[in-house]
Amino acid sequence: MQYFTIQAKSHREAITRMKTEYGENAKILTYRNIRIGGFLGFFGKEGVEVTGYVGGGEQPKHSLEDNKIKILEAAKKEQTLNYILREIKELKQNVHLPQSVGGGAMHPSLEKLRALLEENDFSTAYTAELIERAGKAFTFSELDQFQRVSDTVVDWIADDIPSVPAAVNVRTPRIFTVVGPTGVGKTTTIAKLAALYGIESDRRPAQKVRIVTIDSYRIGAKKQIEIYGEIMRIPVSAAETKDDLKKLIALYSDADLILIDTIGKSHRDFKRLAEMQELLDGVGAGQEVHLAVSASTKTRDLEEIFKQFEPFGYTQVIVTKLDETYQIGNILSVVKDKRKPVSFITDGQKVPQDIAEATPLRLLLQLEGFRINRELLEKRFTEKVKALA
C-alpha cells in the first residue's frame, strides 16, 4: 500500500492532484490547513495538506496507532521531526475531522444533507445544528458514506421529538381546550376529537362527550359545530361569558370529556386573545390546552404563533392540514425548540376518519428524501416510552 502527502493552495486543487497522480483508488487519511512559502513563518499563503493512501476499493480498518505509523512512514523523507510530532498530535486530538474544507467548502455529503433539510423546511438554526453535529460525529472518510450519515441524522431528529407526557391526576371530567389562530381548522378538529372519543370503535369504548363553543365572533361557527353534534348525537352548548362557561362546566360534571372550541383570531389580535384568555379562566384548573397549528405554516410564523399563545398555558400541539404540505421540518424544528409534544394530527376534512394520535414515527414518515426504517424506529420509540413510564 502506497502513502502520500500533497500540499496545495485549496482543497479542490489537492483533490484534483490526488486523483490525477494516484488514481481513483486514492483515499484521504488526514486533512489540515497550512501556510505555504514565506520566510521564518512570515508572508506565507494559506494552503491545505492532504495525507492519504492508495489501495483497493475498500477502506482499510486501521487503529489510531496504525495510522500514526503510516503517517510517519509517508513523511520521513520530506518532513522534520518536529513537524511529524505535530502531525501525530493533531491526529490524536482530531480523530473526527472538521466538516468544512479549505476555502470554506463543505464535504459533499454535508452539502447534500443541508439541501435535504432545507427542502423539508427545517429552520435555519436546526439545520445548522444538525450539520455541525454530523461534521463532528463522522470522520472525513466516513462522510463519504452518505446513507449512513443520513440515517444517523434521522435518528437524531427522532430523539429530538418531544414525547407526550403520561396523564397524571387527570381531572374528571377531562377538559380539552383547543386554541390557535384563525384558519387552522379548530372547529373541524373539535368535531373529529368528539367522534374519536364519543363514537365506539375497536380501539376504545364510547365516552360521554360534550362540546362547548365560545366562538361567537365567526359567522356560522356555532351552527357548524351544532350540525356536527347532531350527526354524532353529542350535545353542543355556547358560552359568551366566563360565568356562562363556569355554569356549563358544572352542568356537564357527569361527562367523561368536555371539548372547548375557542375563538379563531389572528395571533396578532392581542385584544381578542386577552378577552379569550379571561373567558377561559371560567374553566378552572386542570384543563388540557392544545395549540392547533397548520402544517403548511412557515417556520417563522410558527415561532410567532407559539410565542403569542404561551399565556394560554398550552402543553401540547395539534398539527392540522398535514395533507396540504409535503414538508414537516417546520413543525419538527419548532416543537423541538419549544419542547412541546404533538398530541394529534389531522390530514383531511372527513369526520371522524382524518385524525389520529400523533407518533414520532408518523411525523418522520412525512420527511422527503430520507430513508425511514419503520421497524427500527418503532422499536426505538417503544423502548423510550417504557423508559419514561
Image: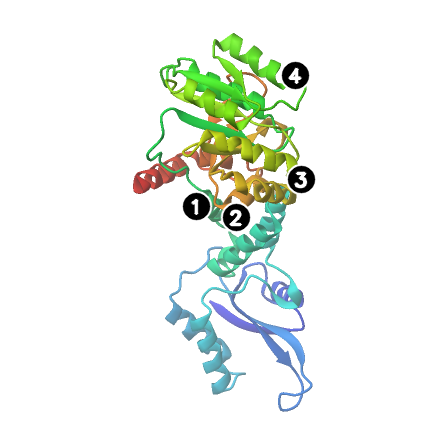
Q: Which amino acid does label 1 sit on?
A: Asp
Side (left or right) of 209 relative to 387: right
**Looking at the image, which residue is at 50% across and 59% down?**
141
Real-space CA distance between mark 3 and mark 1, rounded to the nearest whole angstrom: 33 Å
Q: Mark 2 vs mark 3: give the one in front.
A: 3
Identify residue for label 1: 159
Real-space CA distance between mark 2 and mark 3, rounded to the nearest whole angstrom: 21 Å
| For the residues bearing labels 2 and 3, Cβ distance under 8 angstroms | no
| For the residues bearing labels 4 and 1, Cβ distance under 8 angstroms | no
Marking on residue 268: 3
377 or 332: which is nearer to us? 332
Identify residue for label 4: 220
Q: What residue type is labelled 2?
A: Asp
Residue lying at the far bottom of the rendered structure: 40
| For the residues bearing labels 2 and 4, Cβ distance under 8 angstroms | no
Q: What residue type is labelled 4?
A: Gly
Specify the color scheme: rainbow
